[in-house]
Image (cartoon, rainbow, N blue to C red):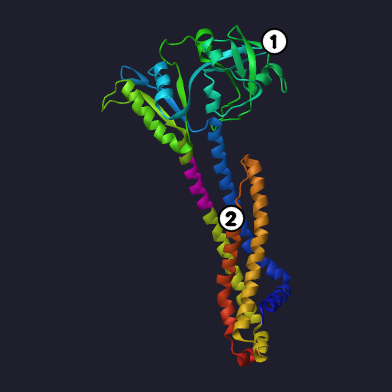
């Protein structure tokens, strides 16, 4: 018998018991769909982590000043001004980084024409939006000349605009008051969404750092009253940039060997990698658990094929008596097992993709699934069919024709 005849014979045998064949394939359907859904959910969670850290900034390092202490009580990072404007300039000039920006923060009431809104005002430089990969949807951001002139200009986030004027309003050219001082709106930032902790990135207003210190909150002279955001030249260079900045600041602050740093550097790339590693482990665990159901489906195939061999013993004996070889019988039963597992695998892929897309929409995660995962899952379901169908097929091929014909 050639391959086409074997496939046709196997198909006829399965269609004789449609309901039993379908119920047997259900186990494989459940196993494959569970694996697909779990892997897709894991990939979606991984992509969500990537998007979260992309929203915070590209290749971002955050340099935070040291901790103040009083009577042995530590105030925590950022409670003592230890970073200077000269430090910031030195980081920009003497280390291999792409962009550097101060980040000075204060809460303030912003008044529009007839509404007001309390938000976080950030005093910074033009490099801030480059580091955060934050474009404007209307107008522009401020430039170096605005910083040098301490210009009273402001760039607003979407949430602030919506609360002051409503949605789809263009405030560029209008005036607002920040702590009672008039500022001209020169731009509106694109929407960023929320941080992992639920902070609204769009509830913000950006002003030049020089303007911030003179109009919003008094500065500390030569010290940066906030943090310094640094963008490395590439994602794989954040560790090197961090080492360079640590060495530079220790040298500038005259910290000898054995002395603790009077600053700290937060590497978001390391945080993202740690979260992604945790997500990958969880995804692998869920996929492994789901794969167990696929193995259970394989056992179901073996069970039904053994029943089929018993039911069709006389048929097998008759075929062998008229010239069918043991190989022909073996190939037919293997083809039946393979058809059950492959059919169940293909249906399971459809069910799994639909389930994964619904779950991703429910949790608000990106839907992500790689074609190679689908191919691997189909291949694994076929392997299950072959492995669990081999024993019944060998049993059928080794039947003695005379005994098979006498079987009742």
Asked if residue 298 is among those painted magenta in the image, a careful observer would answer no
Q: Secondary structure at mark 1?
A: loop
Q: Quadrant of the N terminus?
A: bottom right
Span colored in magenta: 274-286
386, 401: nearer the viewer? 386
Asked if residue 265 is positioned above or below residue 122 in the image, the reply reads below
Q: Position of residue 233 (x, y in %)?
A: 47, 33
Asked if residue 273 is positioned above or below residue 8 in the image, the reply reads above
Residue at point 66%, 50% (across, down): 355
Which image quadrant is residue 347 in?
A: bottom right
Q: Main secondary structure of the magenta part?
A: helix
- Which sits earlier in the primary sequence, circle 2 or circle 1? 1
Q: Residues within 10 Å of mark 1 (few under 14, many from 20)?
A: few
352, 254: nearer the viewer? 254
Q: Quadrant of the C terminus?
A: bottom right
Asked if residue 273 is positioned above or below residue 34 in the image, the reply reads above
Residue at point 26%, 24% (across, down): 256
Determine which residue is flagged by label 2. Answer: 372
Q: Position of residue 59 (x, y in %)?
A: 49, 33
Asked if residue 284 is among those painted magenta in the image, a careful observer would answer yes
Q: What is the distance, in whole Å, between disc 2 and disc 1 at their CAs?
A: 56 Å
Q: Position of residue 191 (x, y in %)?
A: 63, 28
Q: Nearer the viewer, mark 2 or mark 1?
A: 2
């Amino acid at each position: 018998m050639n391959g086409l005849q074997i496939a046709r014979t196997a198909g006829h045998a399965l269609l004789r018991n449609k309901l039993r064949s379908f119920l047997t394939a259900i186990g494989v359907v459940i196993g494959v769909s569970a694996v697909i859904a779990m892997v897709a959910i894991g990939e979606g969670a991984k992509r969500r982590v990537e998007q979260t850290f992309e929203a915070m900034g590209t290749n971002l390092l955050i340099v935070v000043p040291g901790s103040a202490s009083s009577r042995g009580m530590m105030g925590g990072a950022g409670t003592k001004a230890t970073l200077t404007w000269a430090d910031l300039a030195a980081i920009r000039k003497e280390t291999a980084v792409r962009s550097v920006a101060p980040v000075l923060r204060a809460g303030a009431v912003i008044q529009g024409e007839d509404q007001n809104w309390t938000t976080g005002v950030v005093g910074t430089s033009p490099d801030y939006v480059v580091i955060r990969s934050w474009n404007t949807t209307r107008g522009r951001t401020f430039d170096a000349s605005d910083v040098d002139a301490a210009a009273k200009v402001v760039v607003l986030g979407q949430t602030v605009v919506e609360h002051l004027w409503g949605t789809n309003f263009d405030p560029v050219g209008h005036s607002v008051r920040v702590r009672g001082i008039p500022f001209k709106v020169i731009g509106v930032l694109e929407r960023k969404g929320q941080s992992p902790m639920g902070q609204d990135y769009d509830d913000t207003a950006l002003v030049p750092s020089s303007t911030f210190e003179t109009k919003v909150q008094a500065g500390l002279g030569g010290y940066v009253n906030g943090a310094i955001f640094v963008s490395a030249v590439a994602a794989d260079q954040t560790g090197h940039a961090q080492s360079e900045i640590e060495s530079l600041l220790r040298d500038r602050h005259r910290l000898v060997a054995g002395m603790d740093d009077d600053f700290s550097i937060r590497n978001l790339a390391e945080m993202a990698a740690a979260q992604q590693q945790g997500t990958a482990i969880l995804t692998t665990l869920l996929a492994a658990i789901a794969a167990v159901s696929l193995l259970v489906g394989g056992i179901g195939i073996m069970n039904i094929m053994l029943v089929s061999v018993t039911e069709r013993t006389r048929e097998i004996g008759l075929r062998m008596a008229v010239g069918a070889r043991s190989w022909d019988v073996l190939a037919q039963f293997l083809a039946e097992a393979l058809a059950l597992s492959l059919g169940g695998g293909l249906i399971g892929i459809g069910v799994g993709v639909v389930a994964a897309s619904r779950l991703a929409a429910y949790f608000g995660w990106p839907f992500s699934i790689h074609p190679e995962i689908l191919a691997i899952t189909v291949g694994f379901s076929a392997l299950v069919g072959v492995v669990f169908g081999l024993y019944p097929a060998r049993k059928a091929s080794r039947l003695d024709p005379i005994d098979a014909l006498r079987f009742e």
